[in-house]
Image: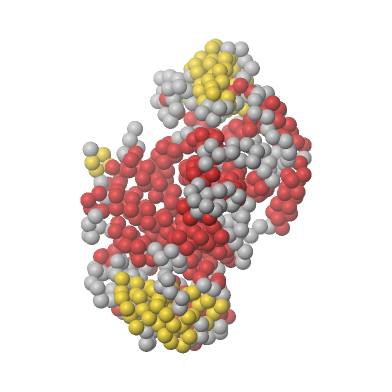
């Protein structure tokens, strides 16, 4: 039993963090407020090819399918860095679709996703609808980071179906976070492959939790830096308990979210029966941490925090854009409530 | 990273579950003194004689010399079996004993640690004073050297179990001229010495558990100093790292139990509004689910603590995160209990425990450093924010 990173994990995380920091400087995220235009790193192949080269899409694919054969914990560690740097593009969808393709031995699709030549966006049924998800996919769906994807991985209950993007009908695009558009679309096509395994949705839930953990830490780091340099009443504002304690609470949330997410990923890797409970609990605490830390980061920056020019709102926007991926907070809580006694 | 338990860990877990189920006291702990002390001491002795006291303590002193992970597995089995709390053994087992192991001389260790494990020596803590609460280092209880003794004069407060304790971890000012952190000494005080007067204080939950302690020319041998003269602040920090880092691991597992108990009770109690069960009220069930998710996370922090100790040999400053989060969750759990089940409702056997629990839970964000001090520590020592003092 060990909840801390191994040396190999630390190295992997550090390398990915360095890559994302250089490929996605903050300025790029600030120039994204151009509806209808694809953000630069996604418009070209270089950024995505770099991620593929680092093995991001291969992490959870078995070695005999051309992957690294690592578990949920390693993938969560990687996606925390994605969250920390506000990673762009359909990363979660591509990772899950590669593993879905591997699960049904579709080597061609798996390989294309792993090597980064195609991308897959993740999609969920719109609330209040009951679409068909099987060998045929028919209904209204909410799709994340669709713009550069060639496939869509539709997740519904215990099933995943991969469909091509050709022929879908876009109803609306929500750009509350212009760096990660959410598309509402009608889909009515035959699936390229279908996987009946709740594991994929659970893994996606963990990756999303990992992203929120990284965001919560980035907001914390942003605040911890700012309150040391911003001075009022003749001293750094971080010396005042009202500000210091707010920062401390941000640190508590980040720590709580991270270790629950790690624990849930390890429970998944152990194949335990309470994997769904822990994944849902992880997404609840990690989403809350991302939301509240973004809010506190804006508050700590005062008037600057309310400007589009400063960074804090980037995390608040990303939280809003992803808040309902892998179930609303309420849906996650019902999953937590439904679990067997935890004693 | 892994959640794998060794075959020894699994066998250990099985063994302790069986033993605890068979041997835990089945009767209620008496509510007054000395009955409560006798109960706690007898249970400690039972654990010691069966070899279960001090799971992670050195075998030299009668412990088991097992890992912190096995200590945690013990706490988990303990909470699951609903075995009684440490009670009067809390200070000795949770931070006085560990402090002596970390900082005491061999003589001090052999004189006290085996007795703590056996339940033969009850300890209390003499840190806070009326004028020195959060600002602990401003303490003014004086100790002057006279031959081979310290002569102590002053007052301590909030000393839990002082009225039933044999020994005390006592902080005294031995150099009033030095900067406040540098003139303090950590000393073992025999509570039966002449010149010590104890006045119990009734707390808001109706118990007489913490006390005021007055010292008039109390003579303590210099040999009782732990660490060096005037280096008591660093020894006290060691004590507090145990108090904040590991002392509450069992309470965390117990809190998880408490939340499940609450879930269970809401399934058998009427809703606070409208028809049906409390559990079917969405406003209640959502709060219960939030507690479940957060308590799961708190338990994950327990495993993180164990992992850090395994790597670094001691609990880190992250203990303040665990302590703060635990105190907030404990208080919320009782608040949800009162909201769901009523403050003054009567169960089949007695009044709802949640109202009394809510009062008692106020202690969690005051003892071992108030929640404000915990947040100062997190801000200053983890995030590097400037001090304002």
Q: Where is residue A29 in the image (x, y as percent from the top left)?
A: 28, 66
Q: Position of residue B139 (x, y in %)?
A: 45, 23
Identify whether B105 is placed above or below A258: above
Q: Position of residue A182 (x, y in %)?
A: 34, 72
Q: Residue at x 56, y 52 (%)?
A: B277
In-front residue for pair B88/A41: B88
Identify whether A16 is placed above or below A341: below
Q: Is residue B107 visible?
A: no
Q: Tell me which colouring the rendered structure shows.
A: secondary structure
In-front residue for pair A8/B339: B339
Name the image quarter holding the N terminus of chain A: bottom right
Identify whether B229 is placed above or below A262: above
Q: Please count the marks in the image.
A: 0
Give the residue at the far front of this rendering. B275
In-front residue for pair B385/A121: A121
In-front residue for pair B322/A175: A175
Q: Which residue is drawn at 56% across and 39% down?
A: B345
Identify whether B134 is placed above or below A186: above
- Image check: A118 left or right of B41? left
- Image check: B35 left or right of A146? right
Q: In which quarter of the image is residue A84?
A: bottom left
Q: Which residue is drawn at 59% across and 38% down?
A: B346
Q: Can residue B89 be seen in this view?
A: yes
Q: Quadrant of residue B94?
A: top right
Q: Which residue is drawn at 32% across and 62% down?
A: A317
Q: Where is residue A255 in the image (x, y as percent from the top left)?
A: 46, 52
């Amino acid at each position: 039993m060990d909840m801390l990173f191994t040396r190999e994990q630390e190295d992997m995380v550090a390398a990915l963090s360095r890559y994302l920091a250089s490929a996605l400087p903050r300025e790029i995220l600030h120039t994204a407020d151009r509806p209808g235009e694809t953000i630069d790193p996604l418009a070209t192949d270089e950024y995505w090819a770099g991620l593929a080269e680092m093995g991001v899409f291969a992490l959870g694919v078995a070695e005999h399918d051309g992957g690294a054969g690592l578990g949920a914990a390693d993938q969560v560690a990687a996606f925390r860095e994605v969250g920390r740097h506000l990673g762009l593009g359909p990363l979660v969808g591509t990772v899950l679709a590669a593993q879905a393709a591997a699960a049904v031995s579709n080597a061609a699709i798996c390989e294309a996703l792993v090597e980064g030549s195609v991308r897959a966006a993740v999609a969920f049924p719109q609330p209040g609808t009951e679409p068909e998800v099987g060998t045929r996919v028919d209904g209204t769906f909410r799709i994340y980071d669709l713009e550069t994807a060639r496939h869509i991985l539709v997740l519904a209950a215990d099933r995943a179906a991969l469909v091509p993007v050709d022929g879908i009908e876009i109803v609306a695009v929500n750009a509350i976070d212009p760096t990660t558009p959410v598309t509402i679309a009608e889909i009515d096509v035959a699936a390229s492959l279908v996987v009946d395994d709740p594991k994929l949705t659970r893994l996606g839930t963990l990756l999303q939790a990992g992203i929120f953990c990284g965001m919560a830490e980035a907001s914390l780091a942003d605040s911890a830096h700012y309150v040391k340099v911003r001075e009022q009443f003749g001293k750094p504002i971080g010396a005042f308990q009202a500000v210091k304690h707010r920062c401390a609470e941000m640190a508590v949330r980040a720590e709580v979210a991270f270790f629950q997410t790690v624990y849930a990923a390890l429970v998944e890797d152990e194949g335990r029966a309470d994997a769904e409970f822990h994944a849902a609990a992880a997404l609840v605490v990690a989403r809350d941490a991302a939301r509240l830390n973004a809010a506190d980061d804006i508050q700590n920056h005062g008037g600057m925090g309310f400007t589009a020019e400063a960074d804090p709102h980037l995390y608040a926007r990303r939280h809003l854009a992803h808040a309902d991926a892998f179930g609303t907070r309420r849906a996650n809580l019902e999953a937590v409530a439904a679990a067997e006694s935890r004693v | 990273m892994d959640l794998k338990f060794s075959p020894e860990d699994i066998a250990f877990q099985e063994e302790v579950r069986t033993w605890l189920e068979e041997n835990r006291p089945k009767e209620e702990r008496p509510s007054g003194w000395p009955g409560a002390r006798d109960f706690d001491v007898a249970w400690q002795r039972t654990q010691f004689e069966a070899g279960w006291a001090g799971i992670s303590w050195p075998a030299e002193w009668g412990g088991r010399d097992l890992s912190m992970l096995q200590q945690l597995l013990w706490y988990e089995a303990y909470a699951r079996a609903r075995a009684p709390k440490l009670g009067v053994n809390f200070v000795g087992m949770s931070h006085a004993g560990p402090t002596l192991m970390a900082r005491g001389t061999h003589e001090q260790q052999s004189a006290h640690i085996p007795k703590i494990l056996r339940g033969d020596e009850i300890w209390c803590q003499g840190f806070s004073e009326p004028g020195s609460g959060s600002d602990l280092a401003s303490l003014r209880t004086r100790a002057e050297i006279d031959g081979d003794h310290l002569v102590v004069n002053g007052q301590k407060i909030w000393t839990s179990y002082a009225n039933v304790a044999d020994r005390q971890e006592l902080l005294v000012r031995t150099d009033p001229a030095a900067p406040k952190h540098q003139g303090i000494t950590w000393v073992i005080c025999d509570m039966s010495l002449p010149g010590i007067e104890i006045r119990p204080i009734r707390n808001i939950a109706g118990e007489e558990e913490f006390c005021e302690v007055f010292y008039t020319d109390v003579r303590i041998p210099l040999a009782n100093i732990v660490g060096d003269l005037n280096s008591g602040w660093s020894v006290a920090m060691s004590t507090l790292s145990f108090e904040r880092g590991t002392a509450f691991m069992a309470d965390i597992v117990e809190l998880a139990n408490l939340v499940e108990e609450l879930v269970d009770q809401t399934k058998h109690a009427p809703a606070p509004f409208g028809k049906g069960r409390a559990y079917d009220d969405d406003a209640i069930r959502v709060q219960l689910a939030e507690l479940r998710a957060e308590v799961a996370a708190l338990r994950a922090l327990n495993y993180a603590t164990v992992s850090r100790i395994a790597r670094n040999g001691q609990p880190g400053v992250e203990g303040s995160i665990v302590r703060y989060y635990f105190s907030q969750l404990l208080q919320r759990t009782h608040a949800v209990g009162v909201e769901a089940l009523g403050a003054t409702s009567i169960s089949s056997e007695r009044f709802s425990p949640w109202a009394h629990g809510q009062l008692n839970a106020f202690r969690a964000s005051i003892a071992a450093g108030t929640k404000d001090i915990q947040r100062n520590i997190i801000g200053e020592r983890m995030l590097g924010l400037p001090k304002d003092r």
